[in-house]
Image (cartoon, rainbow, N blue to C red):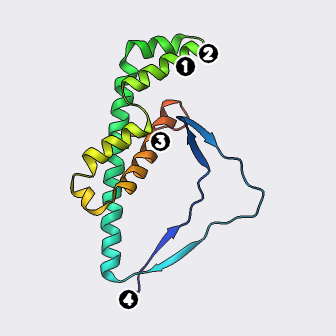
Amino acid sequence: MSDRSLSLPIVVPWLRVNEGELIIMPRTRTPSFITEIPLQASGTQEHTLEVRFRLAQQAYNACLGEALRRLDLMRERKAYQAARKLPQGAARTTVFRDVRNAFGFFPYSLHAWATRYVSHTLLGDHLDVNTIQTIATRAFRAVEQYCVGVRPFSTS
């Protein structure tokens, strides 16, 4: 056994996406906590985890890049620019939905892209399809928050 240990945080999700809409889950009134438990791993297991974490980061960056590319293409569309000038209402929502569908700017479209392109590379040899789709969902949520102004992105 290695005397080095990895600490993995246990995270409780509080954001949900329902039909493309971000929903912030209400905080529970029950007492809760987050704890870090040291993971005792052998050298081989530790190496395997490090490789998978690096590859998961590369998969996330690939999905993030694809989602940002689709967002940029979507924003260049004249229909999108015209919809931004419309008053809030059903007509504006319909135009935005049509533009999003035209560019595949929704989570399951990014899942399909990630499954097709990411899983058929070296990344796919170390990460299963469910993990790749979960990574694609996280990348999409980050870009969606950036799109509506909730989350800023830095390029540094």
State the mark number for residue 67: none
> Which of label 3 and label 1 is nearer to you?
1
Q: Viewed as shown, does residue 95 lie left or right of 104?
A: right
Q: Amino acid at mark 1?
A: Thr
- Crowd band around label 1 with a 10 angstrom C-alpha radius: few (<14), some (14–19), many (20+): some
Q: Amino acid at mark 4?
A: Met
Sequence-earlier tag: 3 or 1? 1
Q: Amino acid at mark 2?
A: Gly
Indicate the position of residue 16 as horizontal and vertical percent values: 58, 45
> Which of label 2 and label 4 is nearer to you?
2
Residue at point 31%, 72% (across, down): 48
Sequence-earlier tag: 2 or 4? 4
Q: Secondary structure at mark 1?
A: helix
Q: Secondary structure at mark 2?
A: loop
Q: Which quarter of the rendered picture does the N terminus lie within?
A: bottom left
Q: Residue furthest left?
A: 121
> Which of label 2 and label 3 is nearer to you?
2
Q: Is residue 55 above or below residue 8?
A: above
Residue at point 55%, 19% (across, down): 93
Name the residue carrying label 1. 93
Q: Viewed as shown, does residue 93 lie left or right of 51?
A: right
State the mark number for residue 89: 2
The reply to whether callout 2 and callout 1 are in contact (CB within 8 Å) is yes
